[in-house]
Image (spheres, rainbow, N blue to C red):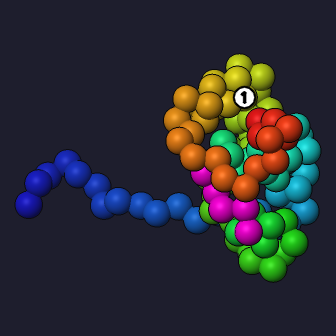
Amino acid sequence: MITGMSMSRRYQYRPLTASEFSRGLQAAHLSMRQFCRISGSDERRVERWLTGEQENPPYWVASLLTAMTVPEARDKVKALADERVINVDRLPPDEDPV
């Protein structure tokens, strides 16, 4: 047995509601599609989070939305998405995804 090591912990958080998610998108100045693009999330799943059809988006959703309200962080996350995206399908050619 290794001494000095503690047992791992799993933290639990109050789930993000659909209205909190929607307000987070607004505060970050993101559309649903833009959020999907930068997070790699499936659009249908995000739609279900927004309508409340599927509850409890993962905690990272709230963390990412909070970070996206900081202009420098927003720019860096968008740049990462631009750099890493390899396939954009079903997107109208005149729509700017982020």
Question: Residue at image x 70%, y 35%?
Answer: 67
Report x, y in % for residue 20. Answer: 86, 58
Indicate the quadrant where residue 71 lies: top right
Identify the amino acid type marked 1: Arg
Q: In which quarter of the image is the N terminus?
A: bottom left
User: Nearest the camera: 80 or 22?
Assistant: 80
Q: Residue furthest bottom?
A: 53
Q: Can residue 76 be seen in this view?
A: yes
Question: Residue at image x 58%, y 65%?
Answer: 12
Q: Quadrant of the C terminus?
A: top right
Q: What stretch is highlighted in magenta?
A: 40-44
Q: Residue furthest top?
A: 72
Indicate the quadrant where residue 16 lies: bottom right
Q: Is 43 included in the stretch rendered in magenta?
A: yes
Indicate the quadrant where residue 44 lies: bottom right
Report x, y in % for residue 4. Answer: 20, 48
Q: Is 8 included in the stretch rendered in magenta?
A: no
Report x, y in % for residue 51. Answer: 87, 72
- How crowded is the residue under tag 1: few (<14 C-alpha within 10 Å), some, or many (20+)? some
Q: Does dot 1 land on a helix, a strand or a loop?
A: helix
Which residue is tagged 1? 74
Q: Is residue 66 left or right of residue 82?
A: right
Question: Residue at image x 67%, y 30%?
Answer: 78
User: Nearest the camera: 67 or 4?
Assistant: 67
User: Nearest the camera: 17 or 4?
Assistant: 17
Question: Residue at image x 70%, y 69%?
Answer: 45
Q: Is residue 8 left or right of residue 25?
A: left
Report x, y in % for residue 33. Answer: 78, 50
How many callouts does the rendering have? 1
Q: Can residue 63 be seen in this view?
A: no
